[in-house]
Image (tube, rainbow, N blue to C red):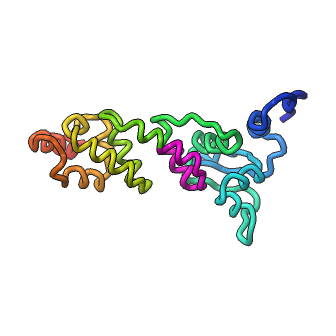
Amino acid sequence: MEAKSDWQIRKSLSDRMKYMLNNQLMCDVTFHVGTDKTPIKAHKYMLASSSPVFYSMFEGPLAEKGTVQIVDMEPEYFNMILQFIYTDKITVDYSNVRNLLYGSEKYMLQLLTEECNAILASHVNVDHACVVLQAAHDFNMEDLKTKVLNFIFINGSEVLDSKDFINLSAECLKILLGSDKFRCEEEHIYQKMLHLGST
């Protein structure tokens, strides 16, 4: 891809790096990402400078040769991870936080992990508590897990009726329903469990 003539002039480092990534200038590694094996090109230098995992991937006795398969992430989120690596900027929100948290943990991107944690902590409310609980459980975020459990215990009936309650894992359901702190009428819980069993 041919670059514009002025893409370096009076641009910040992050803007220049983003331009090179987006326009695939001088890329030296290709990833095949997701179920469709979408090709995504990048620069080993940038990736290795930000992530111990990528550094090990490209250097050392078991260094990857040729294309790299990424089967456990979809292109949308892998591209967001790359944008963060190249620019230190990312928009984390309720809709993408779980996928970005997974990527940040996988590639040991501590700053992104902290940003994801902050977003999750800010969504401890009736509508989103179940998603926060599941993420905290899956990624061993014990402080956040304690915080959201205390919220759910107090607001049991409302959380039980939230749309994401149905998506809780069996482990999380056992934690909630097995606690005598969970404030909810037994009949309400019974009806909800009947509903879950029929879906």
In the image, is residue 115 part of the stretch drawn in magenta? Answer: yes
Q: Position of residue 43 (x, y in %)?
A: 77, 49
- Answer left or right for 112 relative to 142: right
- Along the line of sight, which residue is nearer the eye, 80 or 37? 80
Q: Which residue sits furthest right?
A: 5
Where does the magenta region start and end? 98-117
Task: Please name the residue shown 33% across and 35% down the image.
Answer: 125
Q: Vertically, is 30 above or below 65?
A: above
Q: Which residue sits furthest left?
A: 187
Q: Main secondary structure of the magenta part?
A: helix
- Along the line of sight, which residue is nearer the eye, 41 or 144? 144
Q: Position of residue 76 (x, y in %)?
A: 59, 39
Task: Please name the residue shown 19% across and 37% down the image.
Answer: 157
Task: Please name the residue shown 77% across and 39% down the image.
Answer: 17
In the image, is residue 113 part of the stretch drawn in magenta? Answer: yes
- Picture quarter with the C terminus: top left
- Locate residue 188: give its quadrant: top left
Q: Which residue sits furthest bottom?
A: 61
Q: Position of residue 35 (x, y in %)?
A: 56, 48
Task: Please name the residue shown 26% across and 51% down the image.
Answer: 173
Q: How many marks?
A: 0
- Answer left or right for 73 relative to 142: right
Q: Position of residue 171 (x, y in %)?
A: 30, 56
- Answer left or right for 63 relative to 77: right
- Picture quarter with the N terminus: top right
